[in-house]
Amino acid sequence: MTDRTVNCQAINDLLHGVLSSLHKVSGGSAAAVMRMAGGKMLEALHEDGIELSNGDNHIEDIGEKMRKFFKDDNFCEDFEMKKVDDGVTIHVTNCAFWETTKKLREDGVPPYACPFANLGMAIIQEALGLRSRVDKITPGNSEGDSDIHLKFV
């Protein structure tokens, strides 16, 4: 495949349209669709030879692999994943998809879709055998930063 630059604003506009519509049609069930999307994202990465969990069963080790992948592909400036008592926290610095999150909030759509969260849930299930759900996605200290909490269920 040829290397090319993609317009982030166009991607954010596309995601906003799809995610806003999905929530309007499906309501709370939209989160279940995004859980499936995370699994499909992970499958696609496996097919491309990218192994993020690769037998690791420590969240921090998996998080470090995800950090490298996300940074290398310019999804964000930085990424940190930590296990907490009831789940996993993810901190994303300068997220490429922040505009989508911001617009969904302005539309009154609760945060249910995030490539970091959705892929994180899939990896947690694959590597640790634990299911999780998006508990909350909150703005970080700076524009473009997010704090994500995935709660074990």
Image: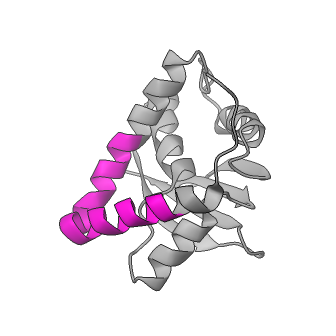
Location of residue 133 in the rendering, given as x and y in whole percent from the top left corner: 41, 54
Give percent across and percent down for residue 53: 59, 25
Number of marks in the rendered image: 0
Residue 9: within the magenta? no
Residue drawn 44% across and 66% down?
16
Query: What secondary structure do most residues of the magenta stretch adopt?
Result: helix
* Quadrant placement of the N terminus: top right
Q: What stretch is highlighted in magenta?
A: 13-37
Residue 73: % across, % down: 71, 38
Q: Does residue 143 show up?
A: yes
Nearer-the-camera pick, 48 or 149: 48
- Residue 129, quarter of picture: top left
Quadrant hosting residue 143: bottom right
Q: Is 38 placed above or below 27 here?
A: above
x and y, in percent, of residue 68 in the image: 76, 35
Q: Is residue 138 left or right of residue 61?
A: left
Residue at coordinates 44% horizontally, 25% vertically from top-left? 43
Farthest residue toward the left?
25
Tell me what residue is drawn at x 62 percent, y 27 percent: 52
From what the image shows, is residue 40 above or below residue 134?
above
| Residue 130 makes an appearance in the image | no
Magenta span contains residue 25: yes
| Foreground pick, 5 / 72 | 5
